[in-house]
Image: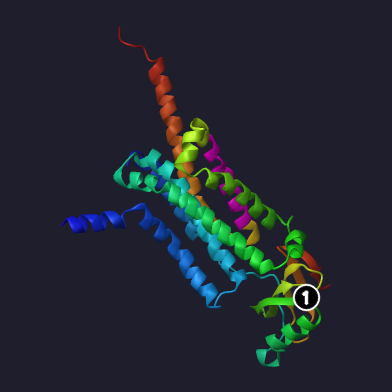
Amino acid sequence: MEVMTAALRTLNSLPVFWLLLSLPALAMMRGYWTGDIIAMDMLHPTGEFSARFMIIAMMISPLITIFGNRGWTGWLLRRRRSFGVAAFVYAMLHLVFYIVDMEELGPILAEFWAPGIWTGWAAMLFFVPLAITSNDASMRWLKRRWKILQRLVYGAALLTLAHWLLIHDGMTGALVHFIPLFMLQLLRMIIIYGRKKKNVIKADSPQPL
Amino acid sequence: MKYPAITATLAAATMAFGFSAPAHATGKMTCEAGPQSGWVSRADLEADLVEKGWKIKKSKVDGGCYEVYGTTPEGDRVEAYFHPVSMEKLLVLRRGKELFRKK
């Protein structure tokens, strides 16, 4: 029985979760190494997974606002950092394949100001400080400022959405991914606003003597 | 669930968005080129372009034309449309920006 418990604990552990998050990358890389998929065609899957994991990470706070601190929301919260860092790693893969596909600096510079391109670079720029501070040491060092810094993710998300809409043929994929996040954030804001109003009313109510 | 009414409304709205998405089609260029038996082969088109200084990543059929992904002799990373019979260059786009369109 103890072996079972230990095995289940291992399966539910963070390192195993990291492994799960890396499975899409392993599948993609296999396609690339065997020559089935060229660098150009690696851009869409790497970008999609980067956006997906970022979106999942961003859904967790709204889910907690809506559903409260339950078992499953706590489970997700403990894994939020891994979703975020995974989003960064897939974004780096995306960038690497972009450079491999473009081959030379010339074409990269020539198209830099295309709206679909510079938004990608800008999103990556926002990702970097988020990734660098995704560790306990940064949280200890920055304290209250850590949370403020992590709000850069909203900028990263908007730039990612813009990049996806502009670079891709068709809006469906981007919208299907981002609209649920938008809806959850909207619901979160409505609920928090409602709570604040309630507290204001409570604070204004006549108190018993 | 703490807020069933609002949650249900937003879930429904989300699903309405998700499932009402229009069908995907590039539609950037169409060619009236007749049956494929009369077409120049993609390999021949690619070879012709490479001779002119293009670098080809891949090509496919789109809208009855040949669509080529690659780098122009001028160093632009483009998607370009060619007529599959005359091999005429019809449209060249660099990340959505029209660099060339046949009049």
Residue that label 1 marks = B90
Q: Residue at x 57, y 65 (%)?
A: A44
Q: Residue at x 51, y 51 (%)?
A: A179
Where residue B102 sits: x, y (%)?
82, 73
Against A21, is A132 above or below? above
Residue B84 visible from this viewpoint:
no
Quarter assignment of residue B15: bottom left
Q: Amino acid at mark 1?
A: Leu
Residue A19 pos. (x, y %): 40, 60
Q: Is residue A31 left or right of residue A72?
A: right
| The N terminus of chain B: image quadrant | top left
The span shown in magenta is A147-164
* Residue at x 61% of width, y 57% of height: A165
* Residue A6 horizontal side relative to residue A50, left or right: left
A160 part of magenta stretch:
yes
- Using residue A205 as the reference point, say whether residue A36 is left or right of it: right
Q: Position of residue B5 (x, y in %)?
A: 37, 41
